[in-house]
Image (cartoon, rainbow, N blue to C red):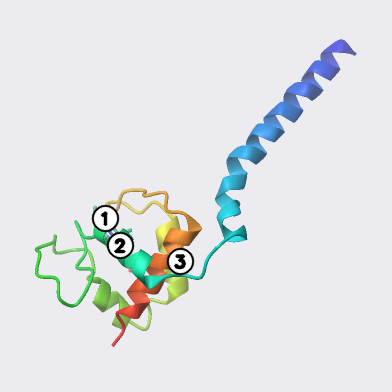
Amino acid sequence: MKHQSLFARVSIAACLFGALTILPVFAPSAGAQPADPKRGRALAEIWCITCHVIDREQTRAVPASPPPFPALADDPAVTPERISGFLRQPHPPMPDMSLTNQEVADLVAYIQSLKQ
Ligand code: HEC
């Protein structure tokens, strides 16, 4: 009996811990603000510019393989859903940037704003 209750307590503690570690992943959507391309742009300047051409004016050299953001914006196959799905998964050689839902939404809004 004593063992059982100890096991039960450990299980509850484990569940609580699990819930606490998972919750923050979902929490941002609760108080989410509308996607903001300006914040997305700022994030792109910090996180993405080392590999991607992030606008139509950029002259800074980048590696050849990553697609330029304006090209992504113009490609009808690259939907907002595809970009946000892509950004939520680690994708070598892109580092896992552990972006929040809000950051993903802002980056998608920014890339979409480049559409011509
Ligand atoms: C270390 C270099 C690197 C960094 C930093 C980087 N990327 Fe990438 N990214 C790549 C490469 C390489 C590809 C092509 C991968 C492929 O096609 O498999 C890519 C592809 C993409 C794609 C195309 C997805 C598709 O559906 O074709 C998107 C969108 C993208 N990156 C967005 C971003 C954003 C937004 C950031 C900043 C938050 C970022 N990347 C930072 C290297 C990088």
Mark 3 crowdedness (10 Å alpha carbons): few <14, some 14-19, many ≥20: many
The residue tagged 1 is: 46
The residue tagged 2 is: 42
Please, what is the three-letter code of the amino acid marked with disc 3?
Ala
Percent x, y of residue 114: 29, 79
Task: Report how far apart the C-alphas of labels 2 and 3 lie in the structure.
Answer: 13 Å
Residue at image location 30% in from the left, 75% down from the top: 72
> Compared to 59, does 16 lie above or below?
above
> Where on the picture, by quarter, is residue 7?
top right
Front position among marks 2 and 3: 2
Percent x, y of residue 54: 23, 68
* Marks 3 and 1, the one that precedes in the sequence: 1
Task: Report how far apart the C-alphas of labels 3 and 1 lie in the structure.
Answer: 16 Å
Q: Give yes or no for contact between labels 3 and 1 (Cβ–Cβ under 8 Å).
A: no
Quarter occupied by the C terminus: bottom left
Please, what is the three-letter code of the amino acid marked with disc 1?
Ile
* Marks 2 and 3, the one that precedes in the sequence: 2
Q: Which mark is residue 14?
A: none
Residue at image location 84% in from the left, 18% down from the top: 5
Residue at image location 10% in from the left, 64% down from the top: 60
**30 sits left or right of 95 in the view:** right
Percent x, y of residue 113: 34, 79
Asked whether mark 1 and ligand 1 are closer than 8 Å, the reply comes as: no
> Compared to 86, does 56 lie above or below?
below
Quarter occupied by the N terminus: top right
> Compared to 105, does 16 lie above or below?
above
SS at circle 3: helix
The residue tagged 3 is: 105
